[in-house]
Amino acid sequence: MAEIICDNQSTRHINLQIKQLINQGETTFLIKEPKARHNLGVAILQPVNITFDGSVGYYCAGMIDGPTIRVKGSAGWGLAESMMNGTVIVESCVGNGAAASIRGGTVVIHDDAAARLGVSMKGGLILVAGNCGYMAGFMAQKGIMIVCGDTGEAFADSMYESVCFVGGEIAELGNDAIIEEPTEEDLRFLTLTFSNYLPQKSEYLSNNVRKYKKIVSGRKLWNFNKKEREIWREAL
Amino acid sequence: MCGIVGFLDKTKSRTTVGKIVLQMLNALGARGPDSAGVALYGQKKDKGMVVQIKLGKQKEATFIVEQLEEFGTISEVKIVAEYLRLVISLEVDIASFLKVVESLDPGIEVVSLGAQLEVVKQVGTPKNLESTYNISSFTGTHGLGHTRLSTESRVDLSHSQPFWAYGYADLAIVHNGHITNYHTMRRLYEQRGIEFHTDNDSEIIGIYFADQLSKGMVLQEVLEASLTDFDGSFSYLVSTPDSIGFAKDPFAFKPLLFTETDDFVAIATEEIAIRSVFSGSYTVRESQSKEIHIWQK
């Protein structure tokens, strides 16, 4: 395992070290004293394991494709933005725009997420153990968002094909968002997801899985017909 | 883009609040190099008010002091860079005093007034503040800080933050964002004879607090009301002699994080400002839209 102590190093230098060590074959990293620096662990395109031993700042794990990144603290705005694949786990809270525009992969947040969680997501899975803020899921096109706690206002506003599950209270549904009854398959999926990603809370969450609401698009804002819809789905 | 910070010591002791606020500000220096300032709360002056005066261009500080002696006993006088700092046992109401002071010289401006509050701000980075004003030697209980990237109004000392709630002793604010109904609100205040010193939209937050508190509202009510009275993007902090608070706009446009431990409360635009000063294990959380919070000393 490679250990990098951030100390007084610049973000550029820390990221460069990670990439150089990956090229040399290293697969596991412990990054100590990140002290909420911005832009750590961006554009990692290999299936390596990186642990940040503390809080990180903005855009951590942005544009990644394949790694597993764990943050033993909180994360600032734009966590995992535009990630293609991989797993990002944050053990505390996250700022605005977490998992925005992700194409794939999994983002797990052990505490609360702030505003605009998963906006314009185009695939992947977002799991928030706590609450989420204003306008989560805005214009989300594909993928699944699970919020175990409460949501802020304008939840799932103008959504396309994404599916959201909420265990707590929804402060206000966004435009064209509607609540559906979860299917038995949905509930099995939720139970499995809790078991996989939140094992310590899994029993409690699974026991309450029937309280979850399923939120999908009402499709009244869609401006294409069924034929175009299939083309669009194909493209995604 | 600006950076704002707040710190409150919960141990009921006086600490190096100037050093702490300055360190937090330094970590946010990249968010705004145009100007920097602090609003710090020190030991209460039993027999007077601390007045921070930005000097004008024409009159010497000694002339100003002589003119103000008729309004009370002046026990301390200090001139540093652009500021005249004095402690005066004010024997007239604040409005009358301000009117006289600011008539003494074009460009003169009372930057803060209070039994505990002292505002110091200037053009340049937070680091410049220390070299000129030795901010880190200030001891007290709590304070605010601001580092500014000007987007609309001038870059000078007057347009810098923090803003004192002009006319209302011991209350200061710092703001990151844009108050988009600023001109509408300003016109209404000016119709009532309330004077503005700058074209900075943030100034109106201080004036708003002074106005609402003078009408009998309490701090919590003003914070709540501000969420609907102000339009635009805002995360702002407000401080009084015994409290510090914040409000975030309904759309959560601007960042603001905070942490509270048994010993202190720290609030900042970015977590890096908190982590660079306070070690140990604690949780920092981004505030949500429409969130307000007040901590008492």
Image: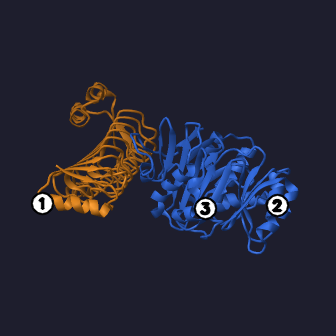
Chain colours: A orange, B blue
Q: Tell which tag, 2 or 3, sits nearer the viewer.
A: 3
Res A24 label: 1
How many residues crowd around disc 3 within 10 Å: few (fewer than 14), some, or many (20 or more)? some
Chain under callout 2: B
Residue at x 86%, y 55% (from the top left corner)? B71
Residue B147 lies left or right of residue A222; in this view the side is right
Percent x, y of residue A144: 27, 44
Q: Residue B196 carries which label?
A: none
The answer to whether residue B64 is left or right of residue B126 is: right
> Compared to B1, does A182 lie above or below?
above
Identify the mark nearer the N-term, 2 or 3: 2
Q: Position of residue B189 (x, y in %)?
A: 73, 57
Residue type, label 1 = Gln
In the rendered image, is residue A104 in sight? yes
The image position of residue B169, as x and y in percent, is 73, 49
Crowding at mark 1 (Cα within 10 Å: few <14, some 14-19, many 20+):
few
Query: What is the chain identity of the residue bearing mark 1?
Result: A
Seen from the viewer's position, the closer of residues B283 and B141 is B141
Per the image, label 3 sits on a secondary structure element best described as: helix
Q: Which residue is drawn at 42% across and 37% down?
A: A170
Q: Seen from this angle, which residue lies furthest left?
A: A25
Q: Is mark 2 on a helix, strand or loop?
A: helix
Quadrant where the image shows the C terminus of chain B: top right
Q: Are marks 3 and 1 in contact (CB under 8 Å)?
A: no
Q: Do marks 2 and 1 both belong to one polypeptide chain? A: no
The answer to whether one can see residue B175 in this image is no
Q: Callout 2, which amino acid?
A: Lys
Residue B124, image x, y percentages: 55, 68
Task: Quickly name the residue at label 3.
Answer: B133
